[in-house]
Structure formats: C-alpha cells, structure tokens
Image (cartoon, grey):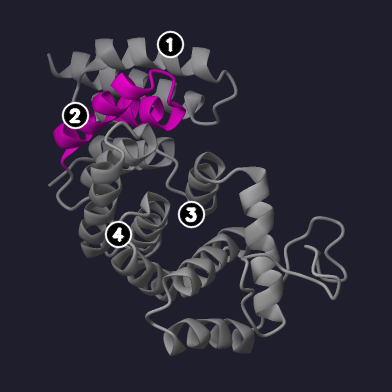
Amino acid sequence: MADNSSLNSKALIIGAAGVVLGFVIGFFLANSLNRQEQDKLRGEVTTLRAGGASKDGAATGRSGTQTQAAGDEDDSFPTLTDEQLQKAVAQADAAPGDAKLQKKVGQALYVYAWQKSKTSILPEVARILNRAHELDPKDSSTSMMAGDAHFLIARSGGDTKQLAAARHLYGAALDIKPDDAEARTKLGMTYFYDSPSDPQSAIREYRRALQSDPRQEMSLQNLVGALIETGSFDEAAKRLVELEKTNPSNRELPNLRAQLEQKRNAAKERK
C-alpha cells in the first residue's frame, strides 16, 4: 500500500499538471483556438440558443453580419437552458452525415462546457465530435477537440477508459501533423493519468513534443511532474528552470518546486 508521502506527492503532481477542469480546458483552448475562432464559436452558441445552427458557423443578425445576442455586449458568454442544449444535440443527431454540422455543434458545445463548467454535457460533446472525426478524419482540429472531450471526461469523473479513446484521437491528429507539440503533449498526458500510470511513456512523448517546440509550456510543465514522479530529480530541476524562463507566471511553478523538494528529501531519508 502506498504511504501517505506517496499519496500526497501524487496529489501534488495532479495539481501541478493542471487537471482542474476549467484550467485544463482553458489551456487547451488558448493553444488550439485564437480569439477570432473563440468569438466565432461564441456566436454559434448564441445561434444554438436561438434554436438553430448557422450555415457559415457564425451567429448572424438580420443584416447577415456577425453579431452577439442582446445582453452579451459585455463579453459574457450566452447561457443555454437544458432544453436548448438538448435541442442542439438533437439537431446534430438529426443529420449524422453532415460533417460540418457535427463539427460546429460539437465545438460550440465544447467551448460552452469550458465557459460554464458544464461537465455534464461532455459525453454528448465527445459523441458528436467523434462523429465529426469519423466523417472527416483528415481534420486534425476536430480530432484534437474530440480527444480533449474524452480526456476531460476521464479527469472530471475518474473513468480512465476514456483515456484510451483520447489517445486514439490524439494519435489520429499526429498522423496528420506529426510535429504538433500540443497533440504530442496531450498524448503523453493520457499515459500519465492512466490507471496504472505510465510516466515513462508520458516522458517519452513530452520530450518528443519539446523537440518540435522547445518552449511548449504545457510540455515542460507535465515533463517536470513526470520526472519528479520517476525520481529524475536533476533533470526535473533543469526543466523547472526552462519552464520558469518560458513563463515566469506559470501558476504551477510553486507546486512543482514544493513537489521536487519533498520528493528529494524523502529520497535522502531512505538512504
């Protein structure tokens, strides 16, 4: 049985890897979608609230130009009722062969889950985005977001079986873009958070991600946590310096420093 020190260290690593739902989705989206794309999906959610999905992927007013619903001028995100969410899902289900519709609805609901911490809709989001991926397997962005949905289901509910689905989808994205550091990092995370955890496979993927992008913040952050877990303290300290140079404001730096010190001291006491 794991001792309290081991359990505490694992908990700290989980925190250090940014698995809190809102932070993880936000980090993924910040890297995956630029502001214009996020605004476009915000507009799509506004359209879903009105009971439909736009043909061009943007919410439109009578003039045909992109607009926000009344009350959203303050940059707040539109809120959907349960009935509106069900209608959005039903709309996608009614046209299962429409790849563009599956992508629009799936991505819009994914962003909605992020903005509203609505984890209950993630299974539907994953199902719709899976369908979009199957209809257009060469669309790496859809593969990535479908993988994200499965990953977040696993991390928010403890169903590690979802990680296998996420791993497959991240792999599909990498088949299209082998040098995608973000996809490679996420692939590594599916190994680290699996049950049982496979930190060595995770480390392999994080290192490959950093070969493509040496300043990939999430790669560095997760690599440090995995290195600490495996007892590779010297490299972990080196990578911590790299992470701080990449982003001195990284919110997990204090946790990672504490974790490294705790693990090192525990190792010294065992000698």
Q: Is residue 93 visible?
A: yes
Amino acid on which disc 3 is placed: Leu
Residue under numbered circle 2: 204
Magenta region: 198-225
Residue under numbered circle 3: 21
In the image, residue 157 above or below residue 138: below
Question: Which of pointers 1 and 2 lies earlier in the amino acid sequence?
Answer: 2
Residue under numbered circle 1: 241
Report the Cα–Cα distance between label 4 and label 1.
Answer: 39 Å
- Badge 4: how crowded within 10 Å, few (<14), some, or many (20+)? some
- Classify the position of the C terminus by image quarter: top left
Q: Position of residue 74 (x, y in %)?
A: 86, 56
Amino acid on which disc 4 is placed: Pro
Judge from the rendering whether residue 177 lies leftward or rightward of residue 102; answer left or right: left
Report the Cα–Cα distance between label 1 and label 3.
Answer: 26 Å
Question: Which of pointers 4 and 1 lies earlier in the amino acid sequence?
Answer: 4
